[in-house]
Amino acid sequence: MKFTLVAALICLAFVSVQQAGEKPASLQTVKHRITGLFSTERENDLREAVKKLPGITLAGIDFANAEATFTYDPAQAFPGVQPDKIVERFDHMLREVSRSTFGVKPPLTIPREKLTLIEIPVYTLDCKACCFAVYGILTRIDGVEQATASFKEHRATALIDPAKTSREALLKALKERGVLLEFPK
C-alpha cells in the first residue's frame, strides 16, 4: 500500500514538473480587416461564424474601419501555417464557416487620409441580402478599400483610392447591375 502511494505521488510530482516546464500558449491579440462587415446588423452573424473556429476568439468589432480584433495562438489556431500565410488561411476558414459572407483581408496599404469617402443613396436597400449585393458590387471595384450598405439608411458608402476609381465609376457599376439609386417617379 505504501509503495503504491509513494509511486502515485512520484508520478503526480513528475507530471506537475513536466507541465510547469511546458511553454504557455502564446495568445496574440490581432486586428484584421473583415470583408462582409457592411453594417452593424452583421455583428451577430460574425460572432456566430467565429464561434465555429476553434482556438479563435472575437474580442471586438470596429465597424467604422471594417475591422475586428481577435485573440488566438497562431500555432494552435493555424497549425503548420507560416506566419506570412495566416491572413490567407484565416480568410479561407472564415469564408468556409460563414458561407463566404465574411472574409479576412490584410491591413490597408494606403493611409486613410489619402482615401475619399463616397456616400450613395440607394432606394432598393431593404434587407440584409440587398445590402450584401450592393456591398459586393462596390468591393469588387478596383480602388474600393472598404464599403458599407445600410437598409435602415438606404445608403451605401465606399472608401476609395481616388487614383484608381471615382464616384462615377461606383454609380455606373451599381446601375449596370440594376440597382435603383433614386426613388421611382
Image (cartoon, grey):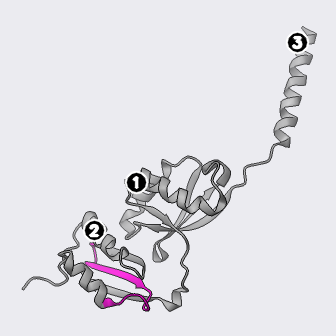
Q: Nearer the viewer, residue 79 or 24?
A: 79
Could you tell which of marks 2 and 3 lies nearer the N-terminus?
3
Question: Do the residues under discs 3 and 1 have CB atoms within 8 angstroms?
Answer: no
Q: CA distance from mark 2 to mark 1?
A: 16 Å
- Image disc number at residue 133: 2
- Residue 77 visible in the shown view: yes
Could you tell which of marks 3 and 1 lies nearer the N-terminus?
3
User: Residue at image x 31%, y 79%?
Assistant: 156
Q: Which residues are magenta?
A: 150-167
Q: Nearer the viewer, residue 94 or 148?
A: 94
- Image disc number at residue 4: 3
User: Residue at image x 77%, y 48%?
Assistant: 24
**Number of marks in the rendered image:** 3
Residue 132 relative to residue 33: left or right: left
Above or below, comparing residue 110 to residue 47 in the picture: below
Residue 70 occupies which quadrant of the picture?
bottom right
Residue 36 relative to residue 121: left or right: right
Residue 105 lies in magenta, yes or no? no
Q: Amino acid at mark 2?
A: Ala
Instruction: Please state the horizontal and vertical placement of residue 65, each as a whole percent of the image.
Output: 49, 76
Q: Amino acid at mark 3?
A: Thr
Above or below, comparing residue 40 to residue 147 in the picture: above
Residue 39 relative to residue 65: left or right: left
Of badges 3 and 1, the one in the foreground is 1
Q: Residue lying farthest top?
A: 1
- The 10 Å Cα crowd at callout 1, few under 14, some 14 to 19, many 20 or more, is some
